[in-house]
Image: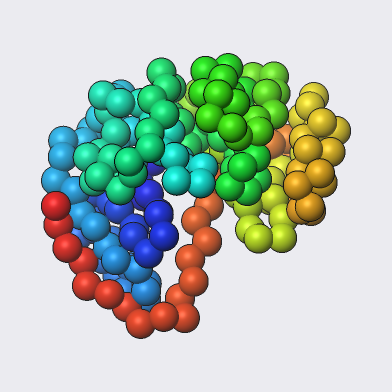
Amino acid sequence: MLLFKYKSSLIMHSDYFKANSSIFDFLSLDIVLSNEPISAKYPNDVRFNAFFMGDTLFCRKDSISRCILNLFEKRAYVNQGYAACSVCKVDQTHLITADKGIAKAASERGFFPLLISPGNIILKGYDCGFIGGASFASDSGVFFFGNIDKHPDGERIKSFIKECGKGCISLSDDCLCDFGGALIIDTSVQKKTPFAT
């Protein structure tokens, strides 16, 4: 919801950066700042809510930040504004989602989606959460905020991840909970200077 990472770039709103600049002091990424309108109400709350598979960006066309659009020549426009929240990226060709539109768009572009049943993920204040917000992936495994075995499609999800050559790690014994995902950042390279667009 607040950040979009692509290669060496980390994109966010300038107000968010100003309020939290100390968090980013250690980063070795190009910080790209947007001044586009944002708010707590949809669609201005999803400016950075997109994901990419390979070199293809998946997003809702009329709500995504131009700072993100400018990074990609190949784009797949979907109706789901919460595109990143809706997807667990296993790797650059395989994804898990309960959104039929995203699954269809991914499949049409040569990617391999696992379509799961919607719901069964806790998000405080809402009817249900999303699989993308309840998980994150590293090079070796996919991590879940909660116990994947408590999801009705748990066995299918575990088999799909195993077929991709990765492990499946449950971080607690609770039902899956949407915390907004996680961002893994390598801090071993020298910090770069923010710039606004």
Identify the image quadrant of residue 128: top right
Left or right: 152, with 72 as reference point: right
* Residue 44: x %, y % from top left: 25, 30
Eyeballing the image, is 104 above or below 186? Answer: above
Of residues 134 and 70, which is closer to you in this image? Answer: 70
Q: At x 61% / y 42%, what residue is drawn?
A: 93
How was the colour assigned to the protein in this rendering?
rainbow
- Indicate the quadrant containing the N terminus: top left, top right, bottom left or bottom right: top left
Eyeballing the image, is 102 above or below 57? Answer: above
Left or right: 188, with 93 as reference point: left
Q: At x 30% / y 70%, what residue is drawn?
A: 22
Q: At x 48% / y 66%, what residue is drawn?
A: 185
* Residue 102: x %, y % from top left: 52, 24
Identify the image quadrant of residue 193: bottom left
Left or right: 6, with 164 as reference point: left
Of residues 143 and 126, which is closer to you in this image? Answer: 143
- In this rendering, does residue 99 appear at all? no
Q: At x 38% / y 25%, what residue is drawn?
A: 77
* Residue 196: x %, y % from top left: 14, 57
Eyeballing the image, is 98 above or below 30? Answer: above
Identify the image quadrant of residue 30: bottom left
